[in-house]
Image (cartoon, helix red, strand yellow):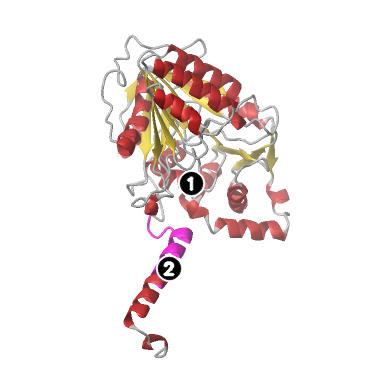
């Protein structure tokens, strides 16, 4: 040891700094280190269709409860892209688009074309794309949109001064037209979202079209990060109109009773999405259906889902099979299967193609839609947004979709799962070491 310390003092200082950096990186990658309580619990979980539940869940995340608006579930790209482009064409004043992934191809060309034409016609067009997820957004299309008067910004590009926060991405899906028509859900702008999930090249995904007051709830998910990224604060009635006479629900939309919205950012340590989902789980009395493409449940989530299943709640989780764009995350999910199956949670894997939908419906009355996955990254590291709706009609449409997807899924059985080979268990354990980053 004395020989090691015998060198110049500055060499020793650099060595200590290097060791601290390595130690910090290891701790950040593999340990939660007090980022959340070891145990989250509640004395009571009021029924999901009660006023007590709405007041409690909105209060815990400091989100207002709102009445009015409509919601419509749109399944797969052939459906939601067609409706979205129609709404873009009818825009009169503003189009705000927040997207994580934007890739070249037919979908991108169609969207950029209509946005450019609307900008040239005088509509205020703003596009916020994540700098990493949107790395491949066509530069020529962006330049044409800007030349027509549209504004395009990249969220948190890799520049000096922001490199320590490079892993904290904007994953929000918030598209709002004229302040009174909005879209949120799992889809982004790439050709894999096109089609109708007919083959492995066409992903299975959902978007929700919101109108009126509900679209107004979605708007802050865009305007907040837009101000952070470029400095422009949006406050006019072109973005926040009076919704009394502006609703355009469409024939299949549900006029919803109550709803609230949550925007989540990694800047704070409260992690409202975690509490929001866990209180929903604690309050479920009869059934809890979850569809998610990325599933790395932390210890509190696993404990509460398992306890609800043991208490007689029908807990079902629908996940992708080998058609996934994130094999390490799927292996990490597998690491937790046995614990959840043993508690009575039913797990299904969708077979035809990549499942990218993000939907939750509970007790036939409470629905959560938006950008968030059931993983630690969504709850702690990404900017996310969700809209939660208390309405039996809309919940029924989500339940119907969930049960239809189960018809194309394989249920994972506990006894069969326990027979999987040792190499699979080892791969799952290794992948799970990085669960804090998924």
Q: CA distance from mark 2 to mark 1?
A: 32 Å
Q: Which residue lies under the disc numbered 1? A: 304
Mark toward the start of the polypeptide (2 vs 1): 2
Considering only vertical position in the picture, is 162 above or below 231? below
Describe residue 230's horizontal placement relative to residue 148 as left or right. left
Q: Is residue 367 visible?
A: no
The secondary structure type at the circle numbered 2 is helix
10 Å neighbourhood of mark 1: few (<14), some, or many (≥20)?
A: some
Considering only vertical position in the picture, is 86 above or below 340? above
10 Å neighbourhood of mark 2: few (<14), some, or many (≥20)?
A: few
Describe residue 319's horizontal placement relative to residue 10 as left or right. right
Residue beneath the point at 40% across and 26% down: 146
| The N terminus: image quadrant | bottom left
32 within the magenta span: yes
The secondary structure type at the circle numbered 1 is helix
Q: Which residue lies under the disc numbered 2? A: 23
């Amino acid at each position: 040891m004395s020989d090691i310390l015998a060198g110049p003092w500055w060499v020793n200082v650099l060595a200590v700094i290097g060791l601290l950096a390595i130690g910090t990186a290891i701790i950040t990658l593999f340990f939660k280190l007090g980022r959340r309580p070891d145990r989250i619990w509640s004395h009571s979980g009021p029924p999901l269709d009660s006023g007590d539940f709405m007041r409690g869940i909105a209060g815990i995340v400091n989100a207002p409860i709102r009445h009015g608006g409509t919601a419509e579930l749109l399944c797969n790209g052939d459906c939601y892209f067609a409706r979205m482009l129609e709404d873009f064409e009818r825009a009169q004043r503003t189009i705000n688009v927040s997207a994580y992934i934007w890739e070249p191809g037919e979908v991108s060309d169609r969207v950029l074309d209509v946005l450019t034409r609307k900008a040239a016609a005088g509509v205020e067009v703003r596009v916020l794309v994540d700098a990493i997820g949107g790395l491949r957004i066509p530069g020529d299309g962006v330049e044409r949109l800007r030349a027509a008067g549209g504004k395009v910004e990249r969220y948190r590009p890799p520049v000096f001064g922001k490199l320590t926060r490079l892993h904290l991405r904007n994953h929000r899906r918030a598209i709002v037209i004229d302040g009174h028509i909005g879209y949120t859900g799992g889809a982004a702008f790439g050709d894999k979202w096109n089609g109708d999930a007919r083959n492995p090249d066409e992903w299975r995904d959902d978007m929700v079209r919101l109108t009126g007051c509900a679209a107004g709830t979605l708007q802050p998910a865009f305007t907040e990060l837009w101000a952070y990224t470029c400095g422009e604060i949006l406050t006019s009635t072109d973005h926040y109109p009076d919704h009394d006479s502006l609703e355009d629900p469409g024939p299949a939309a549900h006029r919803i009773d109550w709803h609230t919205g949550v925007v989540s950012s990694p800047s704070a340590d409260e992690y409202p999405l975690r509490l929001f989902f866990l209180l929903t789980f604690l309050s479920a009395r009869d059934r809890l259906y979850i569809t998610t493409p990325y599933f790395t449940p932390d210890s509190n989530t696993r404990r509460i889902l398992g306890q609800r299943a043991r208490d007689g709640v029908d807990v079902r989780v629908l996940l992708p099979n080998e058609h996934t764009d994130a094999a390490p995350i799927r292996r990490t999910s597998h690491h937790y299967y046995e614990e959840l199956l043993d508690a009575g949670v039913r797990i299904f894997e969708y077979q035809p193609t990549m499942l990218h939908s993000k939907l939750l419906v509970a007790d036939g009355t409470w629905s959560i839609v938006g950008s968030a996955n059931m993983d630690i990254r969504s709850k702690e590291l990404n900017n996310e947004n969700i809209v939660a709706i208390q309405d039996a009609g809309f919940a029924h449409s989500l339940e119907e979709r969930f049960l239809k997807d189960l018809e194309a899924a394989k249920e994972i059985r506990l006894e069969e799962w326990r027979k999987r080979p040792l190499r699979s268990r080892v791969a799952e354990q290794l992948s799970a070491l990085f669960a804090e980053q998924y």
